[in-house]
Amino acid sequence: MTKITFNISKLTAILFIFILTAGCTSKDVQSVAEEEDMTEFVNPFIGTAFTGHTFPGAAYPLGFMQPGPETGNFSWDYCSGYFYDDDRINGFSQNRLNGTGIVDLGDLLMQPFSGDKRDDLSSSFDKSTEIATPGYYAVELTDNDVKVEITTSPHVAFHRYTYNADKTANLLADFQSGLVWNQDRIFTHVLDNEVNFESEYVISGYTRRTEWVERTYYFVIEFDKPVVSKELLEQRDPREKAPRYILNFDLGDDSVLNMKVAMSTTSIDGAKANLTAEGEGHTFDEVYQETKSEWNKYLSKVIIEGTDDDKTSFYTALYHLYIQPNNIADVDGRYVGPNREISQSPTGKYYSTLSQWDTFRAAFPMYTILSPEIINDLVNNMLEFSEQQGHLPIWALMGQETFTMVGNHSVPMVVDAYLKGFTGFDAERAFNEIKKSLTEGKHKNAGWEEYDKYGYYPYDLFRVESVSRTLETGLDDYSAALMANKLGKVEDYEFFMKRSENYKNHYDKSTQSMRPKNSKGEWLTPFDPYQLAHADSNIGGHYTEGNALQYTWHVMQDIPGLIDLMGGKEEAGMTLDYLFTTEQESTGTLSDVTGLIGQYAHGNEPSHHIAYIYMYLDRPWDTQRLVRQICRDYYQNKPDGLIGNDDCGQMSAWYMFSAMGFYPMNPVSGEFVFGAPQIPKSTINLENGKTFTTEAVNLSEENMYVERIELNGSPYSVKFITYEDIMNGGTLTFYMTNQPQ
């Protein structure tokens, strides 16, 4: 793969020239180029190659829209619609997912071209003209002879096309396109569609489509130049439900066409209100400046010192963290949730795309530190979802339930917020929804009657992911128990705490692993602990995107109990050593399982906490060594520099925590276990006006080990720092050495 380094000074220069030639005034560009900002350290191309599934398009922090280029629209490679190594662009759609392993979105594909219509309107492009920075994307389409610039506000995508003045200005408006699993789905995923040409400047309509979820989106498209003619293209397949048009524009003496695209989950009127609020009277350059300024607010939440690559890795991770969750509510707070009715959010916000199975581990705990202002909204939105659907969201996309993965990890998120002192939601209401979700929920990930009867999910009754279901539910139960205890609900506490220990029913001492068991209490035989499994794969299996070696350690709520179960620290240490050192390969392959150190797989979330388990074995040097290895090898400043799906910021949050020197091993404990910092200094600018600083004295390539730690100048011998300590502000100092301590 091509190695690319990100040089912001070059980017700034290119950006200046590119925008200037596209019709922007020198004053407009100068203000962008000269402004001191943190966006210069963000490289949106990181993760756009290999399996990162990120995208380089424009985004607004926590916004609804993410317009950007599509180089492909079907197969696993195109979960975000873009792959760095491709040399053609099919068009520019208005939204996408960041770093997931499933395809959807890619709505409203637009492709500008100068001159005559061709059968294939995809275009080659000059990589040297491709620019990506937070809130802005630009590229020159070689075949189509058009310069494309894109920016966005929360609900409105802004496109600026500079055509060849000597040729006709045209636009392919493809209402059938979308990101789908296979090529045939391009023709079938649209269930219903309506397109209205309201005037020569405005198009509106809606599309009902299904892929990962079934949903309806409404849109309004506004041009600053009139459409003088339109050509309805022939259907490519009789199953197509939506049209594709070639639009021709009268640009007059100008060569620039501006287009605004607003979307809504509620109605065309909702889309129009969004357009009016965020698009009326606002130029492309003004919107970009505002979006850039907003990104600076988020990026400046943490100030770090280090090399240019350190800064790029860290701030790109911070950028990826805030591409989602997405506020899908209209500007008036209305949204469509899982009941598919229009609802009014009492907070004015409705966040979706939380990727709970991934983000409960580190991303959500990071939000509680960096953005406590959104936590109450997030929790209330999850409770609203639960009241509409009957259980807390498992993996919500555009307000709808995907039922993806196992467990219900909205539970630890809600509990984490409650235990950290967030009070902007009703605790009794929250616990009721938690209890309902873990005892009454009627969905494919439930099976509560069998679970309570056997104390685990028997593999003969639950064909796939039986072991993972038990282990992941254990953390949810533990979380519920903690909240019940604080609320004084003794019976509920005892019930959920006992159930949180069900992991013990899967541990087989003879294989030193979590092994499938049937309803008769018999171990699965024959048993292959190296076999990778996933419910959606051909092999099925008893684990979720992993194998027994990886999932054996998925007891984040009770690592000391797991160690005792294994026979103590020495025996547990030998088992853990084997995980990281074995040269035996996995049985079978899964695209999601990447970044292997032995059988440890950093490219997938069930492994993310495992390197920190050595801290519980009184071997901190092993954690420190592994953290260095993972940060060095799997987070690099190049398109293929992210070892796995970013998964809505979880991979990025892992890096941010680890680079600062600590990690939320148990994500509801309020404790952050020490590793070793990878950057000389970081300062978190807390919402309460205080700062929390980490320093790594004598940090170098050789000095990867921690000799001692001080908190506010006093010796600190505890293995973790608490949320309260962080939010109180202060300085955490690591003294680094080249020898294990």
Image (cartoon, rainbow, N blue to C red):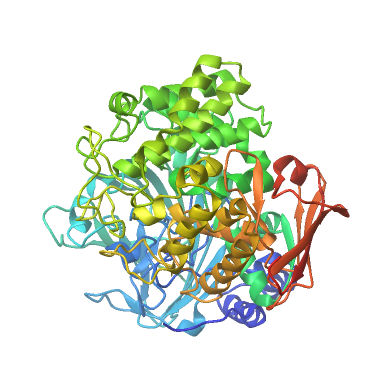
Residue 294 seen from this side? yes
Q: Is residue 36 left or right of residue 407?
A: right
Image point (40%, 81%), residue name? 125
| Residue at position x 27%, y 40% in the image | 517
In the image, what residue occupies the spot 36% across and 22% down? 440
Q: Is residue 170 left or right of residue 488?
A: left
User: Residue 114 appears at what percent x and percent y?
Assistant: 37, 77
Q: Is residue 353 something that shows in the picture?
A: no
Does 413 sit above or below residue 681? Answer: above
Quarter of the image for residue 620 reads: bottom right
Note whether 70 is above or below 426 in the view shown.
Answer: below
Residue 338 quadrant: top left
Left or right, 57 with respect to 368, comes to left
Residue positioned most to the right: 713
User: In which quadrant of the rendered image does the N terminus lie?
Assistant: bottom left
Image x and y of residue 451, in percent: 32, 29
Q: How many marks?
A: 0
